Image (cartoon, helix red, strand yellow):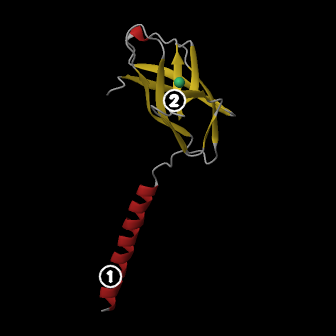
Amino acid sequence: MERHNSTNLFLNILLMAVISLSLFACSNEAPKEGIEVTDAWVRKMPPGMTNTAAFMTIKNYTGAPVTLTGVSMDKAGHVMMHESKVVEGMAKMEHLGQVVIEKEVSFEPGAKHVMIMGLDMSDGAKTYNIRLHFANKPSLDVAAEVRDANQ
Ligand SMILES: [Cu+2]
């Protein structure tokens, strides 16, 4: 009887060990940190048109608010942060000097966007590099995929 119990005890301990090992394996996945940019894209324009916009989602895992102070592109003449708004029935674009990112900010059509002036897309590039500038942080290069707006 005693022997039977100790076998059970041993099996239980073994089982617990296996469970805690597998829990450890699951929680061992690295937590997200820093700043992550997802779904970055540039609206494809018809030939001859050099003004366009880019969109993306910026996620902040630093644990503190991060301030986006500007955007730039080597290949474009001028790049700004804009926000589309409807004021008294009129669509307007407002210049944003900075964007504070608490946890996540999306740049998307009809809302905040990266305004791009003077980008020659006739090179047929599949992606363009967009550089994000932050206050008190190194800048971050993002590869934005060229997409048809209707896609
Ligand atoms: Cu704009």
Front residue of this view, candidates 25 and 1: 25
Q: Tell me the distance, in whole angstroms, between the alpha carbons under discs 2 and 1.
A: 76 Å
Number of residues whose C-alpha sits closer than 10 Å to that of mark 1, classed few (under 14), some (14–19) or many (20 or more): few
67 to 103, vertically: above or below? above
For marks 2 and 1, give the one nearer the viewer.
2
Locate the N terminus by quadrant.
bottom left
Q: Which mark is residue 26?
A: none
Q: What's under tag 2, amino acid-wise? A: Met
SS class, disc 1:
helix
In this picture, residue 141 sits left or right of residue 127: right
Q: Residue 105 in the image: state x and y as whole percent.
A: 53, 40
| Location of residue 89 with respect to 14 vertically, above or below | above
Q: Quadrant of residue 93?
A: top right
In this orientation, which residue lies closer to the viewer: 67 or 8?
A: 67
| Quadrant, the C terminus | top left
Instruction: Tell me the SS state at disc 2.
Output: strand
Marked residue nearer the N-terminal end (2 or 1): 1
Residue 78 position, x and y percent, is 58, 15
Location of mark 1 (residue) = 8
Give residue 90's mark.
2
Judge left or right: residue 23 versus residue 138: left
Task: Identify the residue at horizontal 41%, vertical 62% (top origin).
Answer: 23
- Name which residue lies at 43% across and 27% down: 41
The residue located at (56%, 12%) in the rendering is 77
Please determine whether, in this image, residue 116 is positioned above or below residue 133.
above
Q: Amino acid at mark 1?
A: Asn
